[in-house]
Amino acid sequence: MGEASANKLIGFSSIAIDFLRRKSSEVSNICFAFVYFSHTRTITPVEIMGSLLKHLVYRNGSLSLSKELRDLYSEHMRNSTRPTFTEFAKVLEAESREIPSLFVVFDALDECAQQDDTRTKILNELRRLPTVRLLITGRADVAGVMSILGDVSELEICARDEDIDKYIEGEVDRKENLINNCKNDEDLKKTIREIIVMKARGM
Amino acid sequence: MPRFLIAKLHIDLLAEQTTKKDILSALRQLPEGLNSLYENVITRIQALKQKQRDLAMTTLKWLTYAKEPLHAGALRHALAVTQGSKKIDPEELVCIEQLVSFCVGIVAFDKNSGIIRLEHDTIREYLESVFPADQTNIEIARTCLSYLAFDVFSTACRDLGSLRDRIRNYELSSYVAFHWADHVRGGAEQHLQAVVLTTFEHYGKRDSVSQLQMAKDPWFVLDDVLTDYWVKFDSAYHRSLLHLTSSHGLSNICKTLLKKYRRGNWLRMHSNRKRLYFSGICTAD
C-alpha cells in the first residue's frame, strides 16, 4: 500500500512482477499471474477469473489443459454460452491444486470499481485457494482489503525527503547546463535542492 | 502525490535555462500546484514544432482515453493513420524514444513490457480536463475505423498462422478490433453512425474484425480447442451489421438499422444463427 497507486516512477508492482517472472523461469513449480486495474476500463469478476485462469493454463510458456477445462469449454461452445463466475472459480481451484505456489499480483486494486462487489467477490474466492500468495498495491487501503482479507501484512511506500533529495542531486548531475552553472557554486546547487524538495513535499 | 515526478519536472524546467540568472529567476517562478505544473508541460509541448506537437498531443489523447495499457507499437500505428489511407506507410512510423521526448517528461515507455503510459494517474485526471471526453473519443474512434477500413482487413484469415501474422504486422489491430466500439458508444455514437455503417458494410470486413476480436478473447485463445471452431468460422460465421452493432451495445445505430430493415427480411437472412443471442447480451442501455 502506498501513495497514489505506489509511485509509478518506481513501479513497485513491476519490480515484483519482474522478480516473479525470473523466479518462475528458474523454478518449475511456481506460477504467477497479475491483473492491472485501471478506472478507465471496468473489469467484471468473470473477466478477472478468466484472466487468472488463462495465466495458469499458459504457465511455463506451454499449454496445459485439464479435463475440467476442456469439458467446460466444449459444453459452452456447444450452447454458445460463456462460463459463469462460479464455473471459472471451480476450474481455477482445480487447476491451482497442481501448483505448489501460485503468486497473484493485483496492481492498483483501488482503481477497480466496487460495483457488483467485484473486489470482495474476487478476494473472497482467491482466499479459498490453498496455495495462493497475494500481493496487492493501491492507495492506503482504499480498496478495503483489510476488512475483506483480515490478516495481511502491510508495507507503506512513501517517498521521504532524503530520497527525493538524493534523486534531485542525481538528476542535477545529469543535466549539462545545471552541471556547468553549479560547477563553482555549491550554494546554487543547495538552493535548487532545497526548493525542489519543498515543492515535491506537496508545495 | 507523485513526489519524484514533481521533482523531475521541476528539474527539467531548470535544465532548459541558460545562465545562472535564468535558473535563479526560474526557481522563483516555479509552478504552484500539480495542475499548473502539468499546464506548464502542455505549454512546453505547444511550443514545439508543429509535427512534434501534433504527435505529442495525439499521444496524450490516446493515453488518456485508451481502454487498456497501450503497446508502443500500437500507438505508433495509431499515429501513422491518416484519413483515407488504405495501409500503414512504414516510413511514417515515429521512433518511440523521440515520441517520449516530445511529451516532455509525462510519458514513460517501459522497454520490458513494451507498454507506453502516462507517468502518473494525476496526469490523466488533468488531461481529462484538457481534452473533452466526447470530442476526443470521436477522434480516437475515427482513427480506429480508418484502421479497420484498411484493405488487409477485408477478409478473415483462413488459419491461425496467418491470423497471428496479421496481428503481429498490424500492431493496432488487436486493440482496435476489441475496443473500437468503446470509443463510439455514448456521446459520439450519433456523429459516427455513417462511418460505422460504411466501414462494416461488407461481411468480409465484419468477419475479419470479429475474428481479430475473438483472437484477443481469453476464452478463444486455447489453440487446439480453437481449431475445430476455426474451420467452421469461414462457412457459417457471417455476422450481420445488426448482429455486430448490437453485440457492441451501439443502441442508437441498432435503432437506425432496425428502422431500415423490414423485419421479415433480416430474420430470414440470418435464420441459421441464434440471432437473438447476441442482441440479448447487448448492454442494457
Image (cartoon, coloured by chain):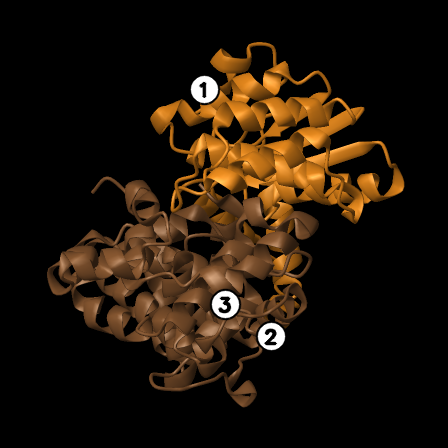
Chain colours: A orange, B brown
Above or below, B45 against A200 in this view is below
The answer to which of A124 and A105 lies nearer the viewer is A124
In percent of width and height, residue B7 lies at: 51, 52
Q: Would you name the residue on which mark 3 appears? A: B173
Amino acid at circle 1: Gly
**CB-based contact (under 8 Å), mark 1 and mark 3:** no
| Same chain shared by disc 3 and disc 2 | yes
Asked whether, in this view, residue B259 is left or right of residue A109, the answer is left
CA neighbours of label 3 inside 10 A, class few (<14), some (14 to 19), many (20+): many
The answer to which of B187 and B130 lies nearer the viewer is B187
In percent of width and height, residue B134 lies at: 22, 59
In percent of width and height, residue B73 lies at: 57, 69
CA neighbours of label 1 inside 10 A, class few (<14), some (14 to 19), many (20+): some
Residue B169 - label: 2
Q: Would you name the residue on which mark 1 appears? A: A144
Circle nearer the viewer, 1 or 2: 2
CA neighbours of label 2 inside 10 A, class few (<14), some (14 to 19), many (20+): few
Disc 3 to disc 2, C-alpha distance: 9 Å
* Chain ID at mark 1: A
Kind of element beneath mark 3: helix
Amino acid at circle 2: Asn
* Chain ID at mark 3: B
Disc 1 to disc 3, C-alpha distance: 37 Å
Quarter of image, res A81:
top left
Above or below, A28 against B64 in this view is above
Residue positioned 11% across, 60% down in the render: B259
Quarter of image, res B41:
bottom left
